[in-house]
Image (cartoon, rainbow, N blue to C red):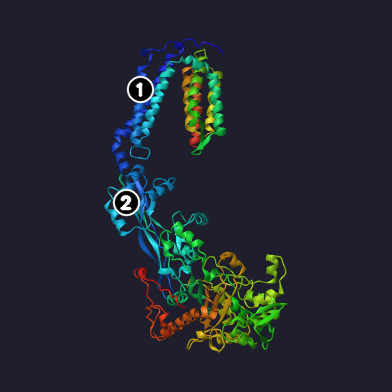
Amino acid sequence: MRDAPGTRDYDWWLLAILAAICALGVLEIYSATHGSSLAGMHMKQLRWLAVGTILMFILSRVDYHLIMDQSLILYLVCIAALIAVLLLGNSRFGAKRWIPVMGQMFQVSELAKLIIIIVLARFFTEVRSDKLDLRDLIKAGLLVGVPLVLILKQPDLGTALVLVPLLFVGAFLAGLQWQHMAAIVLVGAMLVGAVFYPR
Amino acid sequence: MSFSFGSDNRLPQQRLAVASYIIVGMIGVLLLGFWKLQVIDSDQYGQMAERNRVRSIPIIAPRGRMLDRDGRVLVDNRPSFSVLLLRDDPALVEKSLAPVADGLGLSIDDLHDQLDATKALPKFQPIVIKPEATPADVAFIESHRADLPVLEMLSVSRRRYMPGGFMGHASGYVGEVSEQQIEASNSKLRPGDVVGKAGLERQYNDILMGTDGMRRVIVNSVGKEVDHLTQQDPIPGKQIQLTIDYDLQTVAEQSLGARPGAVVALDPRTGEILAMVSRPTPDPNDFAVRISKEEWKQLNEDELRPLFNRAVQAQLAPGSVFKIVTATAMLEDHNPPESFATYCPGYGTFYGRQFKCWVASSKKGPTSHGTLTLHDAILKSCDVFFYTAGMKLGIDRLAYYGDKFGIGHKTGIDLPSEESGLMPSEPWVERVFHRKWYAGETISVAIGQGAVTTTPVQLARLIGGIASGGVFKQPHLRKDLQNVGEERVPLSEPTVEKITEAMYGVVNEPGGTGTALKIKDVELSGKSGTAQVIGYNTRAKFGKQKRFDDNGWFVGYAPRRNPEIVVAVLVQEGGGLHGGESAGPVARDIVKAYYDKKMKKMQGEVTAENSKPTPQNGTPAAALVPRAAVIKEQESAGHTVPVRNDR
């Protein structure tokens, strides 16, 4: 483990923006639920924000390279958990998205988002050249594709679609070639058209 | 797996910048949307939020009324209010419970229970906390609109029946629709609908029931009605006219009194039911609001079965009334011949077993009938004569005629849950008990005992049909019923003449079992019956503890040929009297009232149009005839039907 980061090492601007977004969220929840049967939900949001903040500071003291080293294991755990959800998950509102962990209902696809970011980051650091060749692009696509299909089967289109920009931004920063990008945008547009405007 | 991460600076700065700007741009779009929602359009959304509560309040369609044959109202509706509790805001509901309970005189625990029971229902769906609001409740809700916005009133229309269970079994009652009924209705019925549960209410529910309307109103954030959107008017149910004659029904109710039993009066020329009573009876008004679980349980567990319409459901041995079937069979088959005579010493021995004649145990008069022919045997209801005739005829012929005359078949009366009675036969014992018919059983069946059972409405149809020369009309209660069924059993003229002559003699010749029933200037005829055992089926239904060991029957009619009225009376509490003594007077009262009314009509005193029956004058039976009243919408609530306890 590296030396503990000092206060100067934190990106205070980033934290300030984060804090502002969180505050806005709490305000919105308060305003939307005021006087209704869900009144008081903003307090719940605050409590979890506090938990999240503490976790954030703890995790910031861990060298992220250590986490990156575990990316293969994390990825396998993630896939296993997504399969487990499909096999023995609890159905709510007609979808199987939750498995009980220590008495709490746990939504695995939320964890999957985080792990995919770590795995993609790790994968793209291995690309040495400035240009991402087609083989690596397809490999990255497969890495994201497997959990994406599993999440789609739950079904949870919302979370599944979040994975696509992760891949896109990651690939872009890793040197996605313009012709590949154009091809992806074209195919994507055609897919969207086929799905939402058939005929 | 090992590799180095190299320098973090390897990241292409240019691309990073592009990605950053794109992301900043997207956040900018989001902020713009946020700005539009919160600042630019804020007034518009604020107003929409203020007026966004649209509440749908049902308008209950009134059920159709039931009128008697002269157009007098027998079953009506009355306006009423139900108190609704709006549950959109749980905190407000919780806060309001104590004052609500206090103001409406409800227990707060009950309210909590009701809220718990309806937790699964959507919040916008109000619950009924008091089905019948008193004027004080209405005043309380109106004056607390501001501080108790959780209360709302629903205007409903409740069924109003004649008090005291008058005609209660024929009319039936209404109640909240059951889940099975909703499923069976092809989604025409919805939860909370009020539908007919028994009797005519159930039979003609589709006609009587209207279609509820809906009022859509806008309420503000404190639940106050601020605007009226649309109104879908309710379609009221259609009224039906019954064949019941209110005057005769009143006489029938009073004459039977509180005794368990049943009365069916009908016009055999048309099959129209003029009066129908079954005792004991619940008051259908008790069902009109909401019957409590305890009351319902009590009604169901009562040994006397008040929910059971004896007029169409009681399957009992007809006793000596059945001798008319045996006699008709004998005359039609000429076996034994008409001139057949037998000697009755008070008993007879058949197939090695002794069968008693009722006369042997009679407390007054002779204990034997001596020698008699068919006419006297009917008059005196001699068992030995009919044992002998039955033995000669055999069960096949008895079953043939019993079946022809409708025993074992539903009459088709327009009431739900009619029973069919039973005409035993050789095929029947083989099918049901897998055994041979015992010859001795024929002897019992010949006098209406053994396994033979009939309902009161069946006996009225049967006697009326035979006296009409073999024309059996389908009994019915709805005046404009289409395609009234008719069955014709060809009976020879001498047979009908002989039988009706004998039934006239029962009432009008010395020695008849009904001579006490004679009415001046009216050809009252009939046949009494006293059944000592109840049928196998009914015994199982009534349970073993309670034995109805003397069911008194009397089926009377007038005039003696082609009668206009037949009255079948069952009294299940003979008190040692035979049917002619216990049930006979009820039949006489009704036939007498029928002729009194007919006379008045002929003299022009009563017309169907003004149909205001006047109090009866001076006749000996006046005490039995009710002070008839025209039931108007407002009047009937206070009426009570006096119950005649003496007999």
Residues marked 2 and 1, same chain: no
Looking at the image, residue B383 sits to the left or right of residue B54; the answer is: right
Looking at the image, residue B446 sits to the left or right of residue B267; the answer is: right
Residue ID for mark 1: A17
Residue drawn at (48%, 61%), measured in percent from left and top? B298
Name which quarter of the figure residue B25 lies in: top left
Residue B537: % across, % down: 60, 67
Q: Nearer the viewer, residue B353 or B43?
A: B353
**Chain identity of mark 2:** B
Q: Nearer the viewer, residue B549 or A151?
A: B549
Residue B147: % across, % down: 28, 47
B35 relative to B2, above or below: below
Residue B210: % across, % down: 43, 61
Q: Residues within 10 Å of mark 2 (few under 14, many from 20)?
A: few
Residue ID for mark 2: B102
Nearest to viewer (mark 2 / mark 1): 2
Measure how far apart labels 2 and 1 are at the Cα level.
54 Å
The answer to whether residue B162 is visible is no
Looking at the image, residue A84 sits to the left or right of residue B593; the answer is: right
Determine the secondary structure under disc 2.
helix
Label 1 amino acid? Ile
